[in-house]
Amino acid sequence: SQKIEQNSEALNIQEGKTATLTCNYTNYSPAYLQWYRQDPGRGPVFLLLIRENEKEKRKERLKVTFDTTLKQSLFHITASQPADSATYLCALGGGTGRRALTFGSGTRLQVQP
Amino acid sequence: DARVTQTPRHKVTEMGQEVTMRCQPILGHNTVFWYRQTMMQGLELLAYFRNRAPLDDSGMPKDRFSAEMPDATLATLKIQPSEPRDSAVYFCASGLVVGGQGEQFFGPGTRLTVL
């Protein structure tokens, strides 16, 4: 069965540094991948979508890469700020027989001032 | 500022009772999703609708869960009878899905505790 892996351990970094989160998947060929941010007690909020034919996508301080050979997506936050502290979820969608998103378990990011 | 609304925000009930959760999707969105989130399982898709028609409810325990969209402004998720293992946060999300793709807008969730 398909599996989506995100680092379950929290990522702690210093303010101003670049945070890099990883999303690996197996037994799946998604047509696109999305990243969401979730704050405690709230629903996830959409950040970025990247399609299988795109290598990289940027939005302000955010950058996402998608390597369908490695079956991996990297999510970068440059010049990180304490306000970036949250849990980040990757979600895969599309592909053969798949019509809805499947979410990873998320990685918690803590940015220290 | 359009947003998905969910009621109730919190629900505590006893095992065996019926629970109904409601969701108002964003006007104009054609797809509505129900998810359940727990620490152990993460965010799991229960069911979703496209233009009010159920497309997939394979993630839902059929014997006790049911999901409906009586109209375009209301989606419901019912659990009858509820069990302690149903304790979780239930999220509704909506989106304008075209060609199978689209971002999802999540509601604030209903935190359910079954004693």
Image (tube, coloured by chain):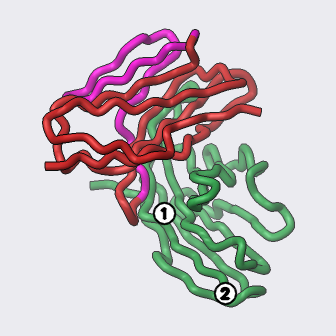
Chain colours: A red, B green
Q: Can I make out residue A45 in this image? A: no
Residue A52 point in image, percent of width and height:
52, 15
- Give the side of residue B82 with respect to residue B71, left or right: right
Residue type, label 2:
Leu
For the residue pair A57 and B29, the one nearer the viewer reads as A57
State which chain disc 1 sits on: B
Residue type, label 1:
Gln
Element type at marker 1? strand
Mark nearest the camera among 2 and 1 is: 2
Is A65 magenta? The answer is: yes
Give the labeled residue for mark 2. B115
Q: Quadrant of residue B107?
A: bottom left
Residue B42 point in image, percent of width and height:
58, 53
- Give the side of residue A107 with respect to residue A105, left or right: left
State which chain disc 2 sits on: B
Residue A46 point in image, percent of width and height:
39, 41
Q: Which mark is residue B52?
A: none
The residue furthest bottom is B14
Q: Main secondary structure of the magenta part?
A: strand
The magenta stretch is: A43-69
Q: Quadrant of residue B76?
A: bottom right
Q: Earlier in the sequence, mark 2 or mark 1?
A: 1
Quadrant of the drawing holding the N terminus of chain B: bottom left
The reply to the same-chain question for discs 2 and 1 is yes
Give the labeled residue for mark 1. B24
Residue at figure coordinates x 65%, y 19% from the top left: A29
Q: In whole angstroms, how far apart are the C-alphas of marks 2 and 1?
A: 27 Å
Q: Is residue B42 above or below residue B78?
A: above
For the residue pair A6 and B101, the one nearer the viewer reads as A6
Q: Is residue B109 above or below residue B7?
A: above
Residue at figure coordinates x 50%, y 49% from the top left: B94
Residue at figure coordinates x 48%, y 63% from the top left: B24
